[in-house]
Amino acid sequence: MAAVSAPAIEAGPGLLRQLLRRRTVMIGLVVLCAVALLALLAPWISPFSPSRLSIANRLKPPGPVYWFGTDEFGRDGFTRTLYAGRLSLLVGVSVVAFACVVGVTLGLVAGFFRRLDTPIARVIDAMMAFPDILLAIALVAALGPSLATVIVALGIVYAPRLARVVRASTLVIRELPYVEAARALGVPTWRILTRHVLRNLVSPILVQGTFIFAYAMLAEAGLSFLGVGVSPEVPTWGTMIAAGRQYVGQADWMTLFPGIAIVLSVLSLQLVGDGLRDLLDPRLRKDL
Amino acid sequence: MSAAPAEPILRVENLKTWFELGSRVARSVDDVSFDVRRGETVAVVGESGSGKSVTSLSIMRLLSPPGRIVGGRILYRTQEGTEIDLATLPEHKMRGIRGREIAMIFQEPMTSLNPLFTVGDQIVEMIRLHEKMSRREARERARRMLELVEIPAAARRLDDYPHQMSGGMRQRAMIALALACDPRVLIADEPTTALDVTIQAQVLDLLRRLQAELGMSVVFVTHNLGVVAELAHRVVVMYAGRVVESAPVNELFERQRHPYTKGLLACIPTPRHGRTDPSGERPRLTPIPGSVPNVAALPPGCAFAPRCPLAIAKCEIDPPLEFAAPGHLSRCWRHDEV
């Protein structure tokens, strides 16, 4: 009955209001929006061009002109952190979108059609058993490093997480009387899947999507740091930290600020994700 | 009771639906035949496990594996007068039959409607799936359907979610949904079992009225013989996957030709059971001893024999389903002595 007696948990304006009532979620959302805004408005906010070199101003510590200091080529840290944020957010959003399309489709098909369940579920299990970052490195190595391949690789890495959640819920929903009733009234299978099953899965997908967003940003930074992601000239938080690694002794601001940016955005996303999960799970909702 | 015997609209012939579980085969429906005429209500009666629900799911072709129709025919007479065999109809054609020609309602009114959509949305979806109609027209039809099933303030109720309705109201909404495309046959699988007794009576009244008004045929699956007496024209009694008796309703209640049916009727409390006899004794309800056999391991011969008070040696041979009286079939060697 739990899944059935939960019409109050559909996504909608009511959900947002309930979400905002929680302090941690509120903080998370504010930070997230601030990061996103800063990144999106980078060309208008930042005082310099992200690629402007200035040998005279190499490795300057943070100060009134260079708020976040400069790097080994004299490029402005603040500007580059903002621009890097755009890419990190882009990677996050794209990975979530890619993982959703692949993962939700696989999960729905595996959960709904018994015959395809075993093969798909095995593949999902196999992929989940592989360490995330290793799989991503292997995929990027196979596809050749570029922003697009990083997105595709991370999408493939995180799709099984979504597929697993979607499959599990679909298995439950498939057996619910209203799905049988819909079939008995001649509703075609694809319509049952998209309308009756998928609509019920909005909440778990939303929650997983938020977490995948955070993981993807983190993983992209990791890949870039390891040098298998985007090329080092492109500013992402990962490449910036990788570049700053050599200068940690003399210019710790080079790693500090992109690091803070990663922590803030991932943490805020996790807070929002946690809030969503608690809110959408009726068992956890009571004691909150 | 219909005056002239109308032509059969649905003929189930020697239907066999088996569940193959490894090496064991559960013959849930074994050689079942019955007719449903136009405008007629046929009750399919039996205990849990008698195969009555599997029969209705077979007609709708809604069996899930390992259940499978292994034999027999389900002949449906279309509006054009041709008969098609639903047992072998391709799935995409079957989809046009479900809801449009034959609709089905289920036992659980609480969960048979999708909690995420309003009742109106669900009826509109159903109508627009089967008929070319604008959203506005479909909504108007949905409103009329809710009025037809006697939901008060129908226009307002269209925008209700299922959880805003009571159980009885939901079952009415479900009936409205099932009848929205004017099907010619309605299969009702224990539609009142989950409801309060008073609500049950209302829903049964409603079904009877709709059946008469719309002239549709109804297959009413139930374990409740009391309901049968009020609603059905004809009764098919099932036991262990087979038809054991079939007769017009009055005839069946007057004179049973199978000891199982007699046993079922003896289990129904009547006002007599509440009173004390002149002899000072209270009449007791008589249960049928034992329970329904497992259809995966049936004894040879008559499946009811182990529980039957009239069992004789001959019952080790399977009795055929024979006419015990005109229009009255029985599967018992001793149908004259019941």
Image (cartoon, grey):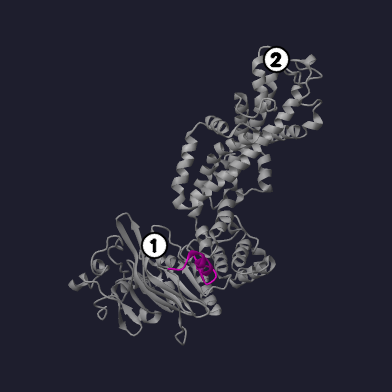
Residue B256 makes an appearance in the image: no
Residue at the disc numbered 1: B68
Residue at the disc numbered 2: A251
User: What is the CA distance from the residue labelled 2 to the residue labelled 1?
Assistant: 73 Å
Residue A89 rendering spot, x and y as whole percentages: 68, 34
Q: Which residues are magenta?
A: B88-105
Along the horizontal axis of the image, is A245 left or right of B75?
right
Along the horizontal axis of the image, is B214 left or right of A253?
left
Query: Observer-nearest residue: B205 or B312?
Result: B312
Vertical placement of residue A94 versus A13, above or below: above
- Identity, as a three-letter code, of the amino acid under mark 1: Arg
Vertical placement of residue B28 versus A206, above or below: below
Q: Is disc 2 in contact with disc 1, using a CB cutoff of under 8 Å?
A: no
Magenta stretch holds residue B305: no
Kindly state the secondary structure of the residue where label 2 is placed. loop
**Label 2 environment density (alpha carbons within 10 Å; few <14, some 14–19, many ≥20):** many
- Identity, as a three-letter code, of the amino acid under mark 2: Ala
Kindly state the secondary structure of the residue where label 1 is placed. strand
